[in-house]
Amino acid sequence: MLRPKIPTMPTPTGLVTPPAVVEPTTVVQHHPTSTPGPAASTRPTVQLTPGTALALVGAGTAAVLVVGAVLVSMLLAVAITGASVAVCAVVLRSLLASDAKRR
């Protein structure tokens, strides 16, 4: 009854270019006549001096303290918001209960 239609591939219109032919190339291996010594590294080496280590420790400590302060302040904001919503709920409940008793 309900059968999906399978789309057919449309025929190309206009100019159709044939696929490019890729011809294989030959690989030529060159053998060096002499073996070179070990190449010197051009990357600069990182030297960890006591001053640098102290700066890294200080920066890490500062980052941990900042992240901790942000997380504690967010937790405090959530706690204060929850307490204020609870107080509002108690006040509304009290107002609605006293209004129901009057009628």
Image: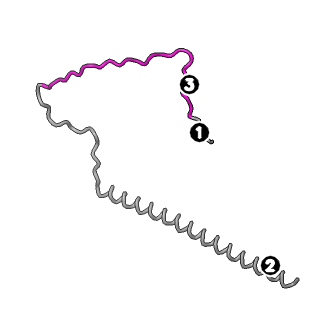
Q: Earlier in the sequence, mark 3 or mark 1?
A: 1
Q: Quadrant of residue 87?
A: bottom right
Q: Is residue 100 left or right of residue 22?
A: right
Hey, what amino acid is under mark 3?
Pro
- Which stretch is magenta? 6-32
Q: Residue at x 40, y 60 (%)?
A: 60
Q: Quadrant for the C terminus, please.
A: bottom right
- In this view, the residue in front, 21 or 103, is 21
| Element type where label 1 sits in the image | loop
Is 44 contained in the magenta span? no
Rendered view: 21 above or below 76: above
Q: Which residue is mark 1?
A: 4
- In this view, the residue in front, 35 or 66, is 35
Q: Residue furthest top?
A: 15
Q: Nearer the viewer, mark 2 or mark 3?
A: 3
Q: Measuring from the top left, give residue 64's x and y in whole percent.
A: 44, 63
Q: Nearer the viewer, mark 3 or mark 1?
A: 1
| Element type where label 3 sits in the image | loop
Label 2 CA crowd tier, 10 Å (few <14, some 14–19, many 20+): few
Q: Residue at x 56, y 66 (%)?
A: 74
Cα–Cα gap, marks 3 and 1: 18 Å
Q: Which residue is mark 2?
A: 96
Q: Is residue 77 left or right of residue 87?
A: left
Is 12 contained in the magenta span? yes
